[in-house]
Amino acid sequence: MIDVNAHVKLNGVISEIGTGNFKISVNEFFVDGQWNRFKEPSVIEVTSADYDNHLTSNELSFLLEAAKKAKQTNLCDDDKEVVDSIIKKLSV
């Protein structure tokens, strides 16, 4: 089965919307290299207090890779400093 701290992907739909919350009906999950289907959808309730607008780990990884690629192009010295700063901050 899956290891602790391994990433799991979920696939589902918004099944209900309320004031300050919504419910997700999860139909499938990706684990151990394959998609699996729930016998009955698993419902997850999310409230606006449960999340924030900070960048996610996937977004940060994308920005890090984009900055590394940008560094290999012909940038002016000022832009290279900015890219180096981004790479340093996101590589921690």
Image: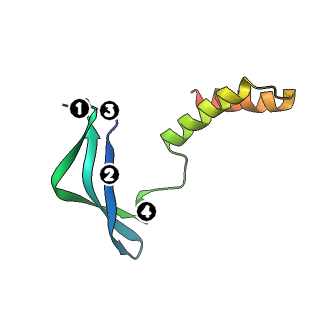
Instruction: Tell me what residue is drawn at x 33 percent, y 61 percent.
Output: 13
What is the x, y in percent for residue 39? 13, 54
Q: Reading the chain from its start, which is encountered first: label 2 or label 4?
A: 2
SS class, disc 3:
loop
Q: Residues within 10 Å of mark 4 (few under 14, many from 20)?
A: few
- Tell me the amino acid under the disc marked 3: Ala
The residue that appears at 36% across and 73% down in the rendered structure is 17
The reply to whether callout 2 and callout 4 are in contact (CB within 8 Å) is no
Above/below status of 58 relative to 14: above
- Which circle's residue, 2 or 3, is located before the other in the chain? 3
Question: Amino acid type of disc 4?
Answer: Ala
Question: Dividing the picture into quarters, in which one does residue 29 lie?
Answer: top left
Q: Nearer the viewer, mark 4 or mark 3?
A: 3
- Going from N to C along the chain, the mark reached first, 1 or 4, is 1
Contact check, label 1 and label 4, Cβ < 8 Å: no
Q: Are marks 3 and 1 in contact (CB under 8 Å)?
A: yes
Q: In the image, 72: left or right of 77?
A: left
* Residue that numbered label 2 is attached to: 11
Question: In whole angstroms, how far apart are the C-alphas of marks 2 and 4?
Answer: 22 Å
